Amino acid sequence: MTSLIMLPAILVDMVGSFIIIVLSFLSLRYAWLLIRKQPENFLWGFLFYFCLTLVCFSVSRAVGHLLKQLLLIADNTEQWHVLAPYSGGFNTLLMISLAAVSIYYHKGIEGFRAIQQKAKSLKEANEQLEVSADKLLKMNANLEEMVEQRTKKLSASEKKFRNFFINSKDMVYFCDSVNRLVNMNTAGLEMLGYTMEDERNLTLQNIFCNEDDLEKYFETLIAVGFVEDLEVEFVRADGSVIYVLLSATAVYDEERNFIGCEGIAKDLTRVRTMMEQLASSEKMASVGQMAAGVAHEINTPLGVILGYSQLMMDDFSPDSEEGQSLQVIERQAKACRKIVADLLKFSRQSESARENIQINEVLEDVLAVTEHSLNMDHIHAHRDFSDNLPAIVGDTEKLRQVFVNFINNAHHAMEEDGGGDIYLSSRYEEESNRVVATVRDTGHGIPEDVVTKIFDPFFTTKSVGKGTGLGLSVSYGIVQEHGGTIEVESPVKGRGGEKIRGTAFHVKLPVTLRESPSVNEDLNLEQF
């Protein structure tokens, strides 16, 4: 009867025990799913372990209730009394565990939030680091690009400078503070006749011809920091002198201390020679005009003097005092006539023939006339004529006169030595299309201060009675009339660059000379 009354309560206890088991397992499953979805979430982890404890507790408690009812229904009360303490103790232990988990929930939450805050801070810091890293990466990329561009510009600038330094036809040099040449380009070394090995020991003192120029160069460089268009003379390795136009700039260190200089020098030797030749040509042209005027003015009174003296000679005996005086007048008048004739030839006032000429034939003709006289004074003539030379156009007789004048001058230059050698040569100069005839002797040479005057009319270094000073002037006028030039070397430069005693006249005549009308002589010297 008592069992029937308690039956609803027993059923409710058993069903409730079963339901609590089912619900606890469902809670555990959902907690597990939450962990799978967010494994790093502390709350879901705590909830999972809480549900696991709750499952254990519900299973323990439900099993205890179910087992109790089943044992009582089966009338096994004693067995239940044996198991009841274990079931109660186990339930109590699980209840304590569940209570402990619940108590430390807040601490866990605080720890989780602190960790979350730290994680957030770390995340923000990481994001900032990523942003900074991205900026640094971009800056690094830009920096690399800037470095690459600057390197390319620097390389291009260095290439331009090196090309300028190597390929420049002018001298480019660098010098330290003690005048030692640190570096010089190939054109500069060639200009001075030095090699790359010589460059190590070169100083500015070695290449400046005049110490005053070097002193002026440095004074100006130190005072104003640069030198501009300074004309100086440099000495080449073989001792010859060249004229250069020099510009230089001082080089300073970061503390404005002078540490050297850099400069460019342009060789003006050829330009200066051309300017001197041009000035000489203008001077000779002026002198020629003056000579022609003087010759015209002298011709008439000279003809009268010569004519009257010859007429009066018919009236006096040659042995009489008057006759001898008239002979002296006639002889001196004829000497004056020769001088006038030379002046006219110099000023090109005489008639010129135009024909094709082989220069070798002209030189052979001249030697045929003069060689015997040369041999008498122990002067030996040497020939070095090139074959198949192109013909030139000109006056054969006048050109013979030119070379006779050169040979006579060479003869006089070697008389004091008791003999010598005279060399006649010819060649074709392809680059200028000219035939070059050279007369070289081994005489005493021409002093440097006289070379520029030898073509002036009436200039001579010979003693009185041995020359009128018109031979080279006449030769100059004849060669000019043929469109040619005369170059003088004294001393003569050998093939190896050495200096040879003597003088050389180089007559350069154009091959394709345009035929020009002859200059008509308006003076007839035979009228006397």
Image (tube, rainbow, N blue to C red):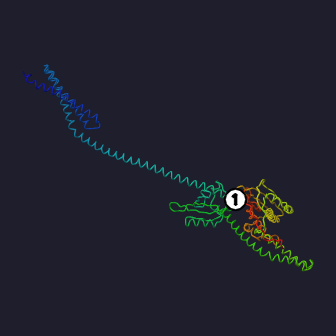
Q: Badge 1 is on which residue? A: 238
Dot 1 crowding, Cα within 10 Å, few <14, some 14–19, many 20+: few
In this rendering, position of residue 137 left or right of residue 254: left
User: Which is nearer the eye, 306 or 254?
Assistant: 306
The count of marks equals 1
Regarding residue 486, the answer to whether it shows in the image is no
- Residue 345, compared with residue 125, is above or below; it is below
Q: Nearer the viewer, residue 54 or 303?
A: 303
Query: Where does the C terminus fall, quadrant-wise?
Result: bottom right
Q: Where is residue 366? Give x, y as percent.
A: 82, 61
On the image, the x and y values in percent for residue 392 come to: 76, 58
Residue lying furthest left in this view?
A: 1
Task: Judge whether 376 appears above or below 312 on screen.
Answer: above
User: Is 362 on the left-hand or right-hand side of 106?
Assistant: right
Callout 1 secondary element: loop
Could you say where residue 291 lies in the image, as x and y percent from the top left? 75, 72
For the N terminus, the image quarter is top left
Please indicate, yes or no, whether residue 147 appears anywhere in the rendered image. Answer: yes
Left-right relation of 243 to 337: left
Q: What amino acid is at disc 1?
A: Asp
Up-down: is 27 above or below 341?
A: above
> In the figure, residue 492 lies in which quadrant?
bottom right
Q: Nearer the viewer, residue 438 or 74?
A: 438
Residue 380 x %, y %: 83, 59
Quadrant of res 425:
bottom right
